């Protein structure tokens, strides 16, 4: 079989393009859904913090977190159905256990350092969630690490420098930012 | 010396193999997911997968997941070896131009 250098170059380019697309798609196939789901949860949760009292917003967060947790499990299971492997199933289960333990540690820490005001509680949970996201990024996709650091930085800026509008800041920059990033990842290809 | 493989060189099959070798050795990809990734039709993909399977380059695994029939595809050892040789041959053509 003989082909021209031009045809060889085009074939190699096609190979490279689809391999890059595959890597990106696999790494982010579910990530964009997580970001959009939790983006909406943050948007609604923090708007609840801004407009309602602490007790009411606490119930709102509880409901949203349960919903987010259930959707995350469903998405995680579906992700595992696109590309399967024996080792992937083991890793998926470990990831689920990691998040469960992280939240348990977060609640334990909250109990130890209580009482906390609303903003302190929110910031504590944000930091734990971001630690989790960055850990996932280090394990699975380095691209995710940078946005975890960005969200953390924005959160700290809002907490220390903009206390009066902290909840609105988190709703639109944190929640809105995650939604926007999820949409960007979804439509990148 | 690495040789070009006519079966693999067909554009859609070349891209199929490129996707499959991107996966880890113990990973297999869902048919529908592969179809969407490659932006081809079911029939088109099915025909090319049959050709690759007949040539001994891929493994097609049909099973039930949540009581729904699913098809998973992976590149086998021979397929990975032949694809690597094909890529090496392409690179050699470019180097010698």
Image: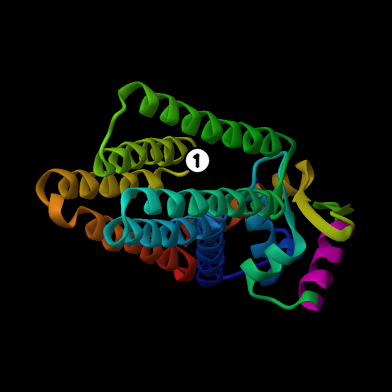
User: Does B32 appear above or below A163?
Assistant: below
Picture quadrant of residue B30:
bottom right
How many marks the image carries: the answer is 1
Residue sitting nearer the eye, A19 or A82: A82
Which residues are the magenta region?
A: B43-54
- At x 38%, y 35%, the residue is A128
- Which percent across, then down, holds residue B58? 80, 52
> Viewed as shown, does residue A12 lie left or right of B25?
left
Along the viewing direction, whichever of A28 and A10 lies nearer the viewer: A28
Query: Residue A108 location, x and y as percent?
Result: 43, 24
The residue at 84%/54% (across/down) is: B66
Q: Is residue B45 magenta?
A: yes
SS class of the residue under badge 1? helix
| Chain under callout 1 | A
Q: Is residue A74 visible?
A: yes
Residue A39: percent from left, percent from top = 41, 59
* Residue at 17% in and 57% down: A165
Left or right, B90 with reference to A156: right
Residue at the far left: name it: A161
User: Is residue B62 visible in this depiction of the protein?
Assistant: no
Q: Residues within 10 Å of mark 1 (few under 14, many from 20)?
A: few
Can you identify the residue that label 1 sits on? A140
Q: Nearer the viewer, residue B55 or A1?
A: B55
For the rendered model, the colour scheme is rainbow
Dominant secondary structure of the residues highlighted in magenta in the image = helix
Query: In the displayed image of the protein, which residue is found farthest to the top?
Result: A112
Looking at the image, residue A13 lies above or below residue A62: below
Image quadrant where one finds the N terminus of chain A: bottom right
């Amino acid at each position: 079989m003989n082909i021209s250098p031009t045809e060889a170059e085009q074939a190699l380019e096609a190979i490279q393009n689809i391999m890059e697309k595959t890597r990106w798609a696999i790494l982010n196939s579910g990530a964009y859904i997580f970001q959009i789901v939790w983006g909406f949860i943050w948007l609604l949760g923090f708007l609840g913090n801004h407009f309602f009292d602490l007790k009411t917003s606490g119930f709102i967060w509880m409901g949203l977190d349960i919903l987010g947790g259930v959707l995350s499990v469903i998405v995680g299971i579906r992700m595992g159905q696109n590309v399967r492997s024996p080792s992937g199933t083991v890793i998926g289960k470990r990831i689920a256990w990691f998040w469960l333990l992280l939240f348990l540690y977060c609640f334990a820490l909250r109990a130890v350092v209580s009482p906390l005001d609303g903003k302190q509680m929110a910031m504590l949970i944000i930091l734990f969630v971001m630690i989790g996201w960055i850990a996932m990024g280090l394990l699975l996709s380095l691209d995710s690490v940078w946005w975890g650091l960005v969200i953390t930085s924005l959160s700290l800026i809002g907490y220390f420098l903009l206390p009066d509008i902290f909840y609105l800041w988190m709703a639109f920059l944190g929640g809105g930012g995650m939604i926007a990033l999820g949409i960007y990842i979804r439509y990148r290809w | 010396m690495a040789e070009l493989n006519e079966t693999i060189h067909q554009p859609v099959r070349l891209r199929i193999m490129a996707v499959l070798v991107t996966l880890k050795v113990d990973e297999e990809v869902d048919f529908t997911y592969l179809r969407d990734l490659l932006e081809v039709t079911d029939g088109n993909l099915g025909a090319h997968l049959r050709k690759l399977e007949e040539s001994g380059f891929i493994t097609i695994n049909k099973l039930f997941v949540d009581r729904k029939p699913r098809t998973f595809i992976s590149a086998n050892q021979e397929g990975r070896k032949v694809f690597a040789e094909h890529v090496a041959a392409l690179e050699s053509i470019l180097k010698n131009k």
